[in-house]
Image (cartoon, helix red, strand yellow):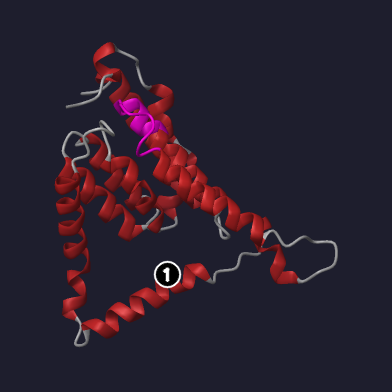
Amino acid sequence: RRLGGNRLGATLAFAWAAYPFTLYASNSNTNDTIMPAFLIFGFWLASSPWARGAAVALAGWTKFAALLLAPLWLSYPSARRVPARGFALGFGAATLAAFSILLLEPEPLHAARVFAERTLGFQLDRDSPFSLWGWGQYHAGGIPDLHRVQQLLQLLLVGAAILVAFVPHQRSPLRLAALTGALLIGFELVLTHWFYLYIPWFFPFVAIAVLFVGRRDGVAAVH
């Protein structure tokens, strides 16, 4: 409501509830809707650096894709005045809160190592039977191995994530939503393993960017 009025708020809520892929994720009992939920709360509180930092951290430790948004969300609303301290405090506090669960284990360091192996390690070595980036696993004649192309695109994506922290200099909520959605879509495009349950990651921000009612006070940066 604060950005686009009652009409936009109601439309976005209906869009999320009626969109088939958000229902698929809920019916599948996955955590793929948790990450965008954290980001939406961060977007709602976008004028607060610590809230943006906390949202990116909580979303990122739910799904690593959200960590790609850190430079963009850090530099909102102006690349000329980056509130690094507040963002870092929020990010750090949320990270400590998220990983404090490891202290419940008898051996926290062992638990941290298992976490890394079963998350980062698993994702880095993950194959997929229905991904063009995973064709190389078949070693079949006539099927190209696109792994190098994938690596190049991944580097370009990281470069884009850093670039949008500086360009454009001024960010409106609309630009923040649009760039957030674009980066998350880019992340999914270069994933070896992709599934339709990942669509809710970017859907809220694409919906905001498409449905945003361009009032003058809505497109201005929130201070």
Q: Is residue 31 above or below residue 85?
A: below
Three-letter amino acid code at the position of disc 1: Leu
Where, by quadrant of the figure, is residue 174 drawn?
top left
User: Quick one: SS at disc 1?
Assistant: helix
Judge whether residue 197 can be spotted in this image: yes
Instruction: Name the one closer to the observer, 101 or 95.
Output: 95
Image point (24%, 42%), residue name: 42
State the quadrant of the N terminus: top left
The residue shown at (71%, 63%) is 135
Residue farthest to the bottom, as pictured:
106
Q: Looking at the picture, how far across and down is residue 137, in whole percent?
A: 69, 70
Residue 197's place in the image compared with 221, above or below, is: below
x and y percentages locating residue 177 in the rendered image? 36, 33
Answer whether residue 221 is magenta in the image: no
Relative to 85, 187 lies left or right:
right
Q: Is residue 194 left or right of residue 18?
A: right
In reply to whether residue 168 is colored magenta, the answer given is: yes
Q: Range of the magenta residues? A: 164-178
Front-most of 14 and 126? 126
Q: What kind of secondary structure does the magenta stretch mostly adopt?
A: loop
Q: Is residue 74 above or below residue 90?
A: above
Residue marked by disc 1:
120
Q: Quadrant of the C terminus?
A: top left
Find the residue positioned furthest to the top.
216
